[in-house]
Amino acid sequence: MPAHTTARGARRVLLGAVAALGAAVLLAGCSTSSGATSSGSAYDKAAKDTKATLNYAVWDENQVAAIKANIKGFNEEYPDIKVNVDVTPFANYWTKLQTQGSSDTLPDLFWMNGPNFQLYAANGKIAPITGEVKAGAIDPANYSSALNKLYTYDGTQYGVPKDFDTIGVWVNKALFEKAGVALPSKDWTWADFQKTGAELSEKLKADGAYGAAGGMDGQTTYYDTIFQAGGSVVNAAGTKSGYASKASEAGLQFWTDLIKSGASPSIKQLTDTTADQWFTSGKLAMYQGGSWFRSALTDTAMEKDVVVYPLPKGKQQATVIHGVSNVVSANSKHKAAAQALQVYLAGKTAQQQQGDMGAVIPAYTGTQDAFTKTMPDADLQVFLDAVDYAQPLPVSKNTAAWNTLETNLLPSAFDGSTPVDQVATELAQKMDTALGKEQ
């Protein structure tokens, strides 16, 4: 992804890796300010708080043009509220935000992702949208229920998604043709995917190309297959790991089998060169990746040869869904103005504008057509249809702590050096310990 894609990719795996350390920082700096309970009365006064300068923090330079277009529309309603857009590259974004959080100097409005959300909500750093919802300014029904859930903590919702992404299989038709392999049916299964991947790899071996690829990115690979097998990564309460179940083990085994068959590069190869890089270099026929990957194909020679497939079906159909949310600082000096901007950015007009400018897949239902039209022959509608069977990205209060465990332990399962059930059991035990420290 341009900065947006790179950032989203980093969200999937790193999840703001510094969050594990940042938890202690935020706790140390946690204040008992009234931000978490006062949003109702604050929003009621929004129309009166018209003279303010807001700082809006984001991490993707590629979206700034669309953001500024949104702000222009916002200023037609609130001409005396100035908005400064502060862009910090994703690699430094969470470190900076945690420093600001510990000193209660967070931006008035800022981007939040699922893996870090609970850390900020639990420590009273962000304001809920209760007042906006009660006032009828935000209707959560206009957004995916899975994403609303992602930004809800202890029964209270703090933001609505500004965009969303789901996972599909990007297919290079030219490599299928070169290999002499027929494109599979879009109503395919795990077995179809495994068989097709192995056949492609065998026929493209002389070219150093592969049919499919695994990897260490949970959002685009093993989380999806765990859900498809009927398993879970973490329970709804965020207190127990789901890795030790037979269903979750089956979801992991899918990738071990794919690599063992030769359908995929090895984990070592995928560590050196990620699956998306294999695909864009013309060395991978099928890449299981997110909707954000569309940006990586813009104006490339292979763009016309790519089509999207839904994820193959396991025991059930499933994909991971995630999306970024705009949240308001609980300690903002201009909270009413910040909430007015939050409301505007969540509205249909701003969301449609984001989609029309190609910035993201907007989260507001009915505004996503522009995305599908950017590659009219690729069937990008697959990503929109996937919302119906999507499950939220697995998170907890301190997601990064157990993401590190996944990164350390799962490679030995995928490369076949340790039995999957053994790795899953060890991961579940260590993850339960990490989750216990969050309570």
Image (tube, grey):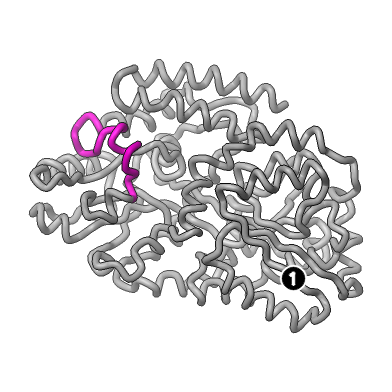
Using the image as rendered, state which of residue 361 and residue 248 is in the foreground. 361
Up the image or down, 20 lies above or below 38; here it is above
Mark 1 — residue? 83
* Image quarter (top left, top right, bottom left or bottom right) of the N terminus: bottom left
Image quadrant of residue 430?
top right
Up the image or down, 257 lies above or below 381; here it is above
432 drawn magenta: no
Relative side of 364 to 74, left or right: left
Image quadrant of residue 153?
top right
- Rendered residue at 67%/22% (across/down): 436
Magenta-colored span: 258-276
Image quadrant of residue 18?
top right
* Image quarter (top left, top right, bottom left or bottom right) of the C terminus: top right
Tell me where residue 159 appears, x and y as whole percent. Answer: 70, 55
**Mark 1: amino acid:** Val
Residue 416 in sight: yes
Using the image as rendered, state which of residue 345 and residue 208 is in the foreground. 208
Secondary structure state at the residue bearing disc 1 = strand
Relative side of 23 to 355, left or right: right
